[in-house]
Amino acid sequence: MTFTEIDRTTMQSLCTLAKLVSNPEAKREEIVVIGQHLGVPKDDTLEVLEEWEEYDILHLKNEEDKRRFVKYCFSFMTQEYNPKSSEVELYGEVLSSLGLETRSDN
């Protein structure tokens, strides 16, 4: 995929997200929301979902890289933001795909 005005790391993050999700087409709206929070227009995010290649993804080598990736993609959820349950579900799926445990608020 050719990366244009949007920085390479952002686009690679969206490609990686598409790879980690078991059915990105079903999570399309949620991934678009993440893309928009990262400054990527909806149409560009939709293009990523349809055209990403294996060489477009980030290679997350260790737990620190994985946590940095999750924080980058989902940082908008830590601010004063009330995520939809489908966004929380996507977050949990990504954590699970990466082998990271969710932390309980209890």
Image: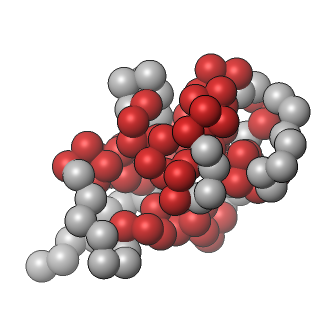
Q: Nearer the viewer, residue 106 or 32?
A: 32
**What residue is shown at x 58% (from left), y 65% (from top)?**
72
In this rendering, would 77 be left or right of 85?
A: right
**What residue is shown at x 70% (from left), y 54% (from top)?**
10
- Type of colouring: secondary structure
In this rendering, would 91 be left or right of 11?
A: left
Residue 63 in sight here: no
Q: Nearer the viewer, residue 35 or 64?
A: 35
Res 104 → quadrant? bottom left
Where is residue 58? Give x, y as percent.
73, 48
Q: Is residue 13 above or below residue 52?
A: below
Instruction: Report the quarter where the N terminus lies.
Output: top right
Farthest-out residue, left: 106
Where is residue 36? Give x, y as percent.
53, 52
Task: Tally the numbered discs.
Answer: 0
Instruction: Report the quarter where the C terminus lies.
Output: bottom left
Q: Nearer the viewer, residue 4 or 88?
A: 4
Q: Is residue 50 above or below residue 46?
A: above
**What residue is shown at x 39% (from left), y 36% (from top)?**
29
Where is residue 105? Give x, y as percent.
18, 77
Residue 15 in sight here: yes
**What residue is shown at x 84% (from left), y 40% (from top)?**
3
Where is residue 81? Give x, y as percent.
30, 70
In this rendering, would 15 be left or right of 22?
A: right
Res 48 → quadrant? top right
